[in-house]
Amino acid sequence: MTGLAYLGFGVGCMLGLFVTGRVANRIAAKHSAQGRFTPESRLGPMLFGCWFLPIGLFWYGWSVKAHVQWVMPIVGTGIFGCGLMCVFLCSNTHLVDSYIQYAASVTAANAVTRSLVGCFLPLAGPSIYDTLGLGWGNSLFAFIALAFCAFPVFLSRYGARIRTHPRFQLDL
Protein backbone atom coordinates (compact mmCIF):
# COMPACT_ATOMS: atom_id res chain seq x y z
CA MET A 1 0.00 0.00 0.00
CA THR A 2 2.85 2.40 0.73
CA GLY A 3 4.00 2.45 -2.89
CA LEU A 4 0.58 3.65 -4.00
CA ALA A 5 1.21 6.94 -2.20
CA TYR A 6 3.28 8.07 -5.19
CA LEU A 7 0.60 7.15 -7.71
CA GLY A 8 -1.20 10.49 -7.57
CA PHE A 9 1.97 12.52 -7.94
CA GLY A 10 3.17 10.39 -10.85
CA VAL A 11 -0.14 10.54 -12.69
CA GLY A 12 -0.39 14.29 -12.03
CA CYS A 13 3.11 14.85 -13.40
CA MET A 14 2.40 12.82 -16.52
CA LEU A 15 -0.87 14.65 -17.09
CA GLY A 16 0.85 17.99 -16.55
CA LEU A 17 3.63 17.09 -18.99
CA PHE A 18 1.23 15.97 -21.69
CA VAL A 19 -1.29 18.82 -21.41
CA THR A 20 1.24 21.60 -20.87
CA GLY A 21 3.47 20.39 -23.69
CA ARG A 22 0.64 20.26 -26.19
CA VAL A 23 -0.94 23.57 -25.14
CA ALA A 24 2.39 25.42 -24.98
CA ASN A 25 3.43 24.18 -28.42
CA ARG A 26 0.08 25.18 -29.95
CA ILE A 27 0.30 28.66 -28.45
CA ALA A 28 3.92 29.06 -29.59
CA ALA A 29 3.08 27.84 -33.12
CA LYS A 30 0.11 30.21 -33.32
CA HIS A 31 2.19 33.19 -32.18
CA SER A 32 5.02 32.24 -34.55
CA ALA A 33 2.62 31.99 -37.50
CA GLN A 34 1.29 35.45 -36.66
CA GLY A 35 4.83 36.83 -36.35
CA ARG A 36 4.43 37.88 -32.73
CA PHE A 37 6.30 35.15 -30.86
CA THR A 38 8.17 36.28 -27.75
CA PRO A 39 9.52 34.23 -24.85
CA GLU A 40 6.47 35.38 -22.89
CA SER A 41 4.34 33.41 -25.36
CA ARG A 42 5.50 30.33 -23.44
CA LEU A 43 3.91 31.52 -20.18
CA GLY A 44 0.25 31.03 -21.14
CA PRO A 45 -0.16 27.58 -19.58
CA MET A 46 1.71 28.72 -16.46
CA LEU A 47 -0.85 31.47 -15.86
CA PHE A 48 -3.40 28.69 -15.42
CA GLY A 49 -1.27 25.86 -14.05
CA CYS A 50 0.43 27.78 -11.24
CA TRP A 51 -2.83 27.73 -9.29
CA PHE A 52 -2.67 23.94 -9.05
CA LEU A 53 0.36 24.16 -6.73
CA PRO A 54 -1.37 25.86 -3.77
CA ILE A 55 -4.62 23.95 -4.42
CA GLY A 56 -2.75 20.64 -4.30
CA LEU A 57 -0.82 21.63 -1.17
CA PHE A 58 -3.96 22.75 0.67
CA TRP A 59 -5.83 19.62 -0.47
CA TYR A 60 -3.04 17.28 0.60
CA GLY A 61 -2.29 18.95 3.92
CA TRP A 62 -5.82 19.18 5.21
CA SER A 63 -6.98 15.80 3.88
CA VAL A 64 -4.04 14.07 5.60
CA LYS A 65 -4.80 15.90 8.84
CA ALA A 66 -8.51 15.05 8.66
CA HIS A 67 -7.79 11.31 8.30
CA VAL A 68 -10.26 10.95 5.43
CA GLN A 69 -10.34 8.20 2.79
CA TRP A 70 -6.78 7.31 1.69
CA VAL A 71 -7.35 8.42 -1.89
CA MET A 72 -8.01 12.07 -0.97
CA PRO A 73 -4.38 12.99 -0.11
CA ILE A 74 -3.25 11.12 -3.22
CA VAL A 75 -5.59 13.26 -5.34
CA GLY A 76 -4.00 16.31 -3.70
CA THR A 77 -0.52 15.15 -4.69
CA GLY A 78 -1.80 14.58 -8.23
CA ILE A 79 -3.08 18.14 -8.45
CA PHE A 80 0.24 19.38 -7.09
CA GLY A 81 2.21 17.26 -9.57
CA CYS A 82 0.19 18.57 -12.50
CA GLY A 83 0.83 22.16 -11.45
CA LEU A 84 4.50 21.46 -10.78
CA MET A 85 5.10 20.12 -14.28
CA CYS A 86 3.19 23.01 -15.82
CA VAL A 87 5.30 25.59 -13.99
CA PHE A 88 8.52 23.64 -14.59
CA LEU A 89 8.01 23.25 -18.34
CA CYS A 90 6.84 26.81 -18.94
CA SER A 91 9.59 28.40 -16.87
CA ASN A 92 12.33 26.32 -18.50
CA THR A 93 11.16 26.99 -22.05
CA HIS A 94 10.80 30.68 -21.19
CA LEU A 95 14.38 30.78 -19.92
CA VAL A 96 15.71 29.03 -23.02
CA ASP A 97 13.74 31.30 -25.36
CA SER A 98 14.83 34.40 -23.44
CA TYR A 99 18.54 33.57 -23.66
CA ILE A 100 18.84 31.44 -26.79
CA GLN A 101 22.56 32.09 -27.22
CA TYR A 102 23.24 31.10 -23.60
CA ALA A 103 20.57 28.41 -23.24
CA ALA A 104 22.96 25.80 -21.81
CA SER A 105 24.31 28.21 -19.20
CA VAL A 106 20.88 29.44 -18.17
CA THR A 107 19.61 25.87 -17.89
CA ALA A 108 22.64 24.91 -15.80
CA ALA A 109 22.19 27.92 -13.49
CA ASN A 110 18.53 26.99 -13.08
CA ALA A 111 19.44 23.38 -12.27
CA VAL A 112 22.04 24.45 -9.69
CA THR A 113 19.56 26.83 -8.03
CA ARG A 114 16.86 24.14 -7.91
CA SER A 115 19.36 21.63 -6.53
CA LEU A 116 20.48 23.99 -3.77
CA VAL A 117 16.89 24.68 -2.76
CA GLY A 118 16.19 20.95 -2.95
CA CYS A 119 19.21 20.31 -0.74
CA PHE A 120 18.54 22.81 2.03
CA LEU A 121 14.75 23.13 2.18
CA PRO A 122 14.23 19.54 3.42
CA LEU A 123 16.43 20.38 6.41
CA ALA A 124 13.71 22.77 7.61
CA GLY A 125 10.85 20.37 6.84
CA PRO A 126 10.82 18.28 10.02
CA SER A 127 10.85 21.31 12.31
CA ILE A 128 8.13 23.03 10.27
CA TYR A 129 5.87 19.97 10.33
CA ASP A 130 6.63 19.22 14.00
CA THR A 131 5.70 22.79 14.93
CA LEU A 132 2.75 23.41 12.61
CA GLY A 133 1.48 19.92 11.85
CA LEU A 134 0.59 18.61 8.41
CA GLY A 135 -2.38 20.91 7.83
CA TRP A 136 -0.74 24.22 8.64
CA GLY A 137 2.73 23.11 7.51
CA ASN A 138 1.43 22.42 4.01
CA SER A 139 -0.69 25.56 4.21
CA LEU A 140 2.48 27.59 4.84
CA PHE A 141 3.98 26.25 1.62
CA ALA A 142 0.64 26.73 -0.15
CA PHE A 143 0.54 30.40 0.88
CA ILE A 144 4.09 30.84 -0.43
CA ALA A 145 3.06 29.17 -3.71
CA LEU A 146 -0.01 31.41 -3.80
CA ALA A 147 2.19 34.49 -3.52
CA PHE A 148 4.33 33.23 -6.40
CA CYS A 149 1.22 32.87 -8.60
CA ALA A 150 1.58 36.60 -9.27
CA PHE A 151 4.99 36.03 -10.86
CA PRO A 152 3.77 34.66 -14.23
CA VAL A 153 1.38 37.61 -14.53
CA PHE A 154 4.22 40.02 -13.75
CA LEU A 155 6.55 38.27 -16.19
CA SER A 156 3.92 38.25 -18.94
CA ARG A 157 3.39 41.96 -18.55
CA TYR A 158 6.95 43.20 -17.91
CA GLY A 159 9.15 40.36 -19.20
CA ALA A 160 10.07 42.01 -22.49
CA ARG A 161 10.96 45.27 -20.74
CA ILE A 162 13.10 43.46 -18.17
CA ARG A 163 14.82 41.34 -20.81
CA THR A 164 15.74 44.35 -22.96
CA HIS A 165 16.90 46.54 -20.05
CA PRO A 166 20.67 47.15 -20.25
CA ARG A 167 21.15 45.87 -16.71
CA PHE A 168 20.00 42.39 -17.74
CA GLN A 169 21.81 42.19 -21.07
CA LEU A 170 24.41 39.43 -21.24
CA ASP A 171 27.77 40.39 -22.68
CA LEU A 172 30.22 37.53 -22.40
Image (cartoon, helix red, strand yellow):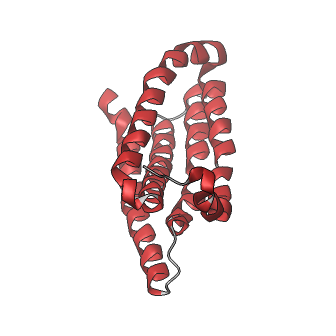
Q: Is residue 24 rendered to the left or right of residue 136?
A: left
Q: Is residue 26 rendered to the left or right of residue 56?
A: left
Q: For the point 45% across and 80% down, which residue is it?
A: 32
Q: For the point 55% across and 33% down, which residue is it?
A: 68
Farthest residue in the front direction? 172
Q: Is residue 152 visible?
A: no
Quadrant in the picture for residue 118:
top left
Total residue callouts = 0
Quadrant in the picture for residue 26:
bottom left
Q: Is residue 110 rendered to the left or right of residue 63?
A: left
Q: For the point 55% across and 65% down, which residue is it?
A: 40
In the rendered view, tell whether residue 134 sits above or below residue 86: above
Q: For the point 48% across and 60% down, which residue is it?
A: 98
From the viewer's side, name the closer residue of 128 and 67: 128
Q: Is residue 71 visible?
A: yes
From the viewer's side, name the closer residue of 39 and 47: 39
Q: Where is the N terminus found, in terms of image quarters? A: top left
In the rendered view, tell whether residue 91 sits above or below residue 3: below
Q: Is residue 100 rendered to the left or right of residue 47?
A: left
In the rendered view, tell whether residue 62 sits above or below residue 153: above
In the rendered view, tell whether residue 120 sits above or below residue 160: above
From the viewer's side, name the closer residue of 85 and 68: 85
Percent of width and height locating residue 122:
48, 21
Percent of width and height locating residue 3:
30, 31
Percent of width and height locating residue 127:
58, 12
Percent of width and height locating residue 136:
66, 26
